[in-house]
Amino acid sequence: MMDISLHDAIYTRQSVRRFLDTPIAEADCDSLLAAAAQAPSPHGRQPWRFVVIGTGTPRERLCDAMSSEWQSQLGNDGSDANSIAIRLAASRARITSAPLLFLPCVDLSVLDHYPDAQRQQSEYLMAVQSIGCAIQNMLLTAVALGIHSGWMCAPLFCGETVRKVFDLDAQLIPQALIPFGYMAQSPMRRPKRSGSSLRVNVNE
Ligand SMILES: Cc1cc2nc3c(=O)[nH]c(=O)nc-3n(C[C@H](O)[C@H](O)[C@H](O)COP(=O)(O)O)c2cc1C
């Protein structure tokens, strides 16, 4: 672990989309998971699990399953065949080449149960909010380990398909794919807003 300040970790983290082949040490994988476990969570229940998709796992099968669903979604949106093919190929390359890949899932089994849909939805949203905290812990820890990462939202749009590929428990709801590796190409970055521009004032 590098001696890096929290400030530097926050301000230097960036989403990297191309990685070298260099593998990630098992100890670093463990450190990322340990950092996730420190995140705040509703009722302290830690309603998240992380499927570790090693390089030996059938990533092509995951891509095939997600591609066919994504292809039909994009087709329904009116995208042309060429641009669909380009997006699918880029996504497949990212998934198959990442040295380490996590599939973060919300774990419904530890959530509270409410008789009404609105509170149940809030309970689910709390779990989703907290998995974001857990993932951010991983991203910042990766910076301290000299490792890069990039968030992919694809499983959110085809959760059931992803669950079936890995035969996951029905209580595990896929939220994202988070590749980790060593940067092969510096990303293009969109400008960040200033902190003060996020501020909303109300009448006192
Ligand atoms: C919930 C979420 C979903 C995202 N999904 C994707 C994605 O599917 N593909 C991608 O390339 N980046 C994705 N990103 C990364 C954003 O594009 C990136 O964070 C943003 O452009 C800001 O860049 P930075 O992370 O380098 O600061 C996602 C980020 C978040 C938080």
Image (spheres, helix red, strand yellow):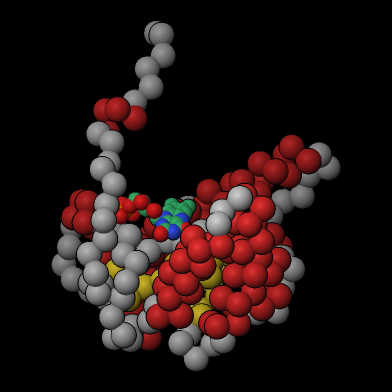
Q: Can you see residue 118?
A: yes
| Quarter placement of the C terminus | top left
Q: How many marks?
A: 0
Identify the residue at image location x=72%, y=39%. Answer: 119
**How far across and down, in percent of the image, does residue 145 sit?**
25, 72
Q: Is residue 43 left or right of residue 56?
A: right
Q: Which quadrant of the figure has residue 136? A: bottom left
- Which quarter of the figure is the N terminus placed in? bottom left
For image coordinates 28% across by 80% down, the residue present is 20
Q: Residue furthest right?
A: 115
Residue 160, image x, y percentages: 70, 66
- In this image, 3 relative to 81: left or right? left
Q: Residue furthest top?
A: 204
Q: Residue drawn 22% across and 51% down? A: 11
Please tell me which residue lies in front, 197 or 8.
197
- Among all residues in the image, which is located at the extreme bottom? 56
Viewer-proximal residue, 171 or 161?
Answer: 161
Image coords of residue 74 (percent x, y):
60, 56
Q: Is residue 43 visible?
A: no
Task: From the viewer's side, name the closer residue of 35 and 53.
Answer: 53
Is residue 143 shown left or right of residue 122? left
Q: Quadrant of ligand 1?
A: bottom left
Q: Please state if 71 lies on the left or on the right of 103 as rendered.
A: right
At 51% across and 67% down in the image, what residue appears? 85
**Residue 51: where, in percent of width, then height?**
55, 75
Q: Quadrant of residue 15?
A: bottom left
